[in-house]
Protein backbone atom coordinates (compact mmCIF):
# COMPACT_ATOMS: atom_id res chain seq x y z
CA UNK A 1 0.00 0.00 0.00
CA UNK A 2 1.59 3.27 -1.14
CA UNK A 3 1.60 6.22 1.26
CA UNK A 4 2.32 9.86 0.52
CA UNK A 5 5.84 11.17 1.12
CA UNK A 6 6.83 14.83 1.30
CA UNK A 7 7.89 16.23 -2.06
CA UNK A 8 11.39 17.60 -2.47
CA UNK A 9 13.69 18.92 -5.17
CA UNK A 10 16.82 16.85 -5.66
CA UNK A 11 19.75 19.28 -5.69
CA UNK A 12 22.47 16.70 -6.24
CA UNK A 13 23.22 13.00 -5.83
CA UNK A 14 26.64 11.54 -5.15
CA UNK A 15 26.59 7.78 -4.63
CA UNK A 16 24.56 7.06 -1.48
CA UNK A 17 24.26 10.76 -0.63
CA UNK A 18 21.75 13.38 -1.72
CA UNK A 19 21.11 17.06 -1.13
CA UNK A 20 17.38 17.82 -1.10
CA UNK A 21 15.34 20.99 -0.86
CA UNK A 22 12.04 20.51 0.97
CA UNK A 23 9.18 23.01 0.86
CA UNK A 24 7.42 24.25 3.98
CA UNK A 25 5.71 21.27 5.66
CA UNK A 26 2.96 20.86 8.24
CA UNK A 27 3.63 18.19 10.86
CA UNK A 28 2.12 16.55 13.90
CA UNK A 29 4.75 15.88 16.54
CA UNK A 30 5.26 14.69 20.07
CA UNK A 31 8.25 15.38 22.31
CA UNK A 32 9.00 12.50 24.64
CA UNK A 33 11.59 11.65 27.29
CA UNK A 34 13.50 8.41 27.44
CA UNK A 35 15.74 6.45 25.18
CA UNK A 36 15.43 6.50 21.40
CA UNK A 37 13.47 3.26 20.99
CA UNK A 38 11.00 3.89 23.82
CA UNK A 39 10.34 7.43 22.58
CA UNK A 40 9.85 6.20 19.00
CA UNK A 41 7.30 3.60 20.10
CA UNK A 42 5.38 5.95 22.40
CA UNK A 43 5.51 8.83 19.92
CA UNK A 44 4.26 6.69 17.05
CA UNK A 45 1.30 5.52 19.14
CA UNK A 46 0.37 9.11 20.14
CA UNK A 47 0.58 10.38 16.56
CA UNK A 48 -1.23 7.37 15.12
CA UNK A 49 -4.06 7.93 17.60
CA UNK A 50 -4.33 11.54 16.33
CA UNK A 51 -4.50 10.63 12.62
CA UNK A 52 -6.89 7.73 13.23
CA UNK A 53 -9.50 10.06 14.75
CA UNK A 54 -8.13 11.17 18.13
CA UNK A 55 -8.94 14.76 17.35
CA UNK A 56 -11.68 17.35 17.81
CA UNK A 57 -13.51 16.29 14.61
CA UNK A 58 -12.94 12.52 14.93
CA UNK A 59 -11.47 12.91 11.45
CA UNK A 60 -9.14 10.31 9.96
CA UNK A 61 -6.03 11.70 8.31
CA UNK A 62 -4.06 9.65 5.77
CA UNK A 63 -0.87 8.01 6.99
CA UNK A 64 2.29 9.38 5.41
CA UNK A 65 5.93 8.33 5.44
CA UNK A 66 8.45 8.71 6.88
CA UNK A 67 8.15 8.74 10.64
CA UNK A 68 10.94 11.10 11.69
CA UNK A 69 12.80 11.00 14.99
CA UNK A 70 15.25 13.64 16.16
CA UNK A 71 16.82 14.69 19.44
CA UNK A 72 14.60 17.18 21.28
CA UNK A 73 15.68 20.76 20.74
CA UNK A 74 17.39 22.96 23.30
CA UNK A 75 14.14 24.85 23.95
CA UNK A 76 12.71 21.72 25.55
CA UNK A 77 15.77 21.15 27.68
CA UNK A 78 17.50 19.03 25.04
CA UNK A 79 16.40 15.78 26.69
CA UNK A 80 14.39 13.15 24.90
CA UNK A 81 13.15 12.90 21.34
CA UNK A 82 10.78 14.53 18.89
CA UNK A 83 8.72 12.09 16.84
CA UNK A 84 7.07 13.59 13.76
CA UNK A 85 4.51 12.71 11.06
CA UNK A 86 4.29 14.97 8.02
CA UNK A 87 0.69 15.84 7.26
CA UNK A 88 -0.65 15.11 3.75
CA UNK A 89 -0.21 17.82 1.11
CA UNK A 90 -3.12 20.22 1.00
CA UNK A 91 -3.69 20.25 4.77
CA UNK A 92 -2.68 23.28 6.81
CA UNK A 93 -2.64 24.38 10.43
CA UNK A 94 -5.99 26.06 9.71
CA UNK A 95 -7.64 22.95 8.22
CA UNK A 96 -6.28 20.25 10.53
CA UNK A 97 -8.40 19.21 13.52
CA UNK A 98 -7.10 19.95 17.00
CA UNK A 99 -5.47 16.91 18.65
CA UNK A 100 -7.30 15.40 21.64
CA UNK A 101 -4.01 14.64 23.37
CA UNK A 102 -2.10 17.72 24.61
CA UNK A 103 1.20 15.91 23.93
CA UNK A 104 0.48 16.05 20.19
CA UNK A 105 1.38 19.40 18.68
CA UNK A 106 0.79 20.70 15.15
CA UNK A 107 3.56 22.83 13.64
CA UNK A 108 4.61 24.45 10.38
CA UNK A 109 8.21 23.78 9.35
CA UNK A 110 9.95 26.29 7.07
CA UNK A 111 11.54 25.24 3.77
CA UNK A 112 14.86 23.51 4.38
CA UNK A 113 17.80 21.82 2.67
CA UNK A 114 18.92 18.42 3.93
CA UNK A 115 21.89 16.18 3.31
CA UNK A 116 20.56 12.61 3.25
CA UNK A 117 21.96 9.08 3.26
CA UNK A 118 19.68 6.09 2.68
CA UNK A 119 20.20 2.63 4.21
CA UNK A 120 18.25 -0.56 4.83
CA UNK A 121 17.75 -2.65 7.94
CA UNK A 122 16.24 -2.24 11.39
CA UNK A 123 18.00 1.07 12.17
CA UNK A 124 19.81 -0.15 15.25
CA UNK A 125 21.65 2.54 17.20
CA UNK A 126 25.05 1.45 15.84
CA UNK A 127 23.73 1.57 12.26
CA UNK A 128 22.27 5.05 12.73
CA UNK A 129 25.52 6.27 14.32
CA UNK A 130 27.61 4.79 11.47
CA UNK A 131 25.37 6.32 8.79
CA UNK A 132 25.37 9.67 10.62
CA UNK A 133 29.19 9.65 10.69
CA UNK A 134 29.29 8.86 6.95
CA UNK A 135 26.83 11.66 6.21
CA UNK A 136 28.71 14.18 8.36
CA UNK A 137 31.94 13.27 6.52
CA UNK A 138 30.15 13.83 3.18
CA UNK A 139 28.84 17.21 4.36
CA UNK A 140 32.34 18.28 5.51
CA UNK A 141 33.92 17.07 2.25
CA UNK A 142 31.52 19.33 0.33
CA UNK A 143 32.26 22.35 2.53
CA UNK A 144 28.63 22.53 3.68
CA UNK A 145 27.49 23.95 7.02
CA UNK A 146 25.31 21.86 9.34
CA UNK A 147 22.35 23.79 10.78
CA UNK A 148 20.86 21.31 13.21
CA UNK A 149 20.83 17.83 14.67
CA UNK A 150 20.59 14.72 12.50
CA UNK A 151 17.25 12.95 12.33
CA UNK A 152 16.27 9.39 11.50
CA UNK A 153 13.51 8.86 8.93
CA UNK A 154 11.83 5.43 8.81
CA UNK A 155 9.60 4.67 5.83
CA UNK A 156 8.20 1.18 6.34
CA UNK A 157 5.63 -0.50 8.56
CA UNK A 158 6.88 -2.99 11.17
CA UNK A 159 5.82 -6.04 9.14
CA UNK A 160 8.27 -5.15 6.34
CA UNK A 161 11.15 -7.63 6.21
CA UNK A 162 14.22 -6.12 7.86
CA UNK A 163 16.38 -6.18 4.73
CA UNK A 164 13.69 -4.34 2.72
CA UNK A 165 13.23 -1.49 5.19
CA UNK A 166 14.12 1.99 4.00
CA UNK A 167 15.73 4.38 6.47
CA UNK A 168 17.46 7.70 6.03
CA UNK A 169 19.63 9.92 8.18
CA UNK A 170 18.90 13.56 7.39
CA UNK A 171 20.97 16.58 8.43
CA UNK A 172 19.74 20.15 7.88
CA UNK A 173 22.32 22.27 6.12
CA UNK A 174 22.68 25.92 5.09
CA UNK A 175 21.58 26.78 1.56
Image: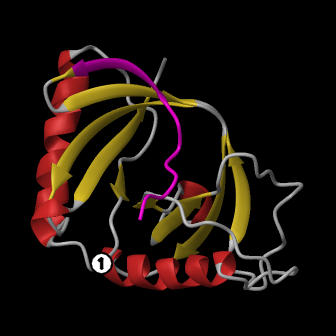
Q: Please state which of residues 75 and 86 is positioned toward the viewer in this rendering.
A: 86
Compared with 37, 25 (above or below) is above
Q: Residue at x 62, y 85 (%)?
A: 49
Q: Quadrant of residue 53?
A: bottom right
Residue 118: image location, x then y, percent: 22, 44
Q: Is 12 colored magenta in this rendering? A: yes
Relative side of 61 to 33, left or right: right
Residue 4: image location, x then y, percent: 52, 52
The residue where tag 1 is placed is 158
Residue 175: image location, x then y, percent: 49, 17
Q: Quadrant of residue 144?
A: top left
Q: Residue at x 51, y 85 (%)?
A: 45
Q: Residue at x 73, y 62 (%)?
A: 106
Q: Residue at x 47, y 22 (%)?
A: 174
Asked whether residue 79 appears in the rendered view, the answer is no
Relative side of 92 to 9, left or right: right
Relative side of 58 to 134, left or right: right
Q: Is disc 1 placed on a helix, strand or loop?
A: loop
Compared with 27, 63 (above or below) is below
The residue segment tinted magenta is 1-13
Amino acid sequence: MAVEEPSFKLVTRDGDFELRDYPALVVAEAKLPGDRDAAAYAGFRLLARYIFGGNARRQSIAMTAPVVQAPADAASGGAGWTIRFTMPAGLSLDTLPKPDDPEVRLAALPPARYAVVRFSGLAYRRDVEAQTARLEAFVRSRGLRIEGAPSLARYDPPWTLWFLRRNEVMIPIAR
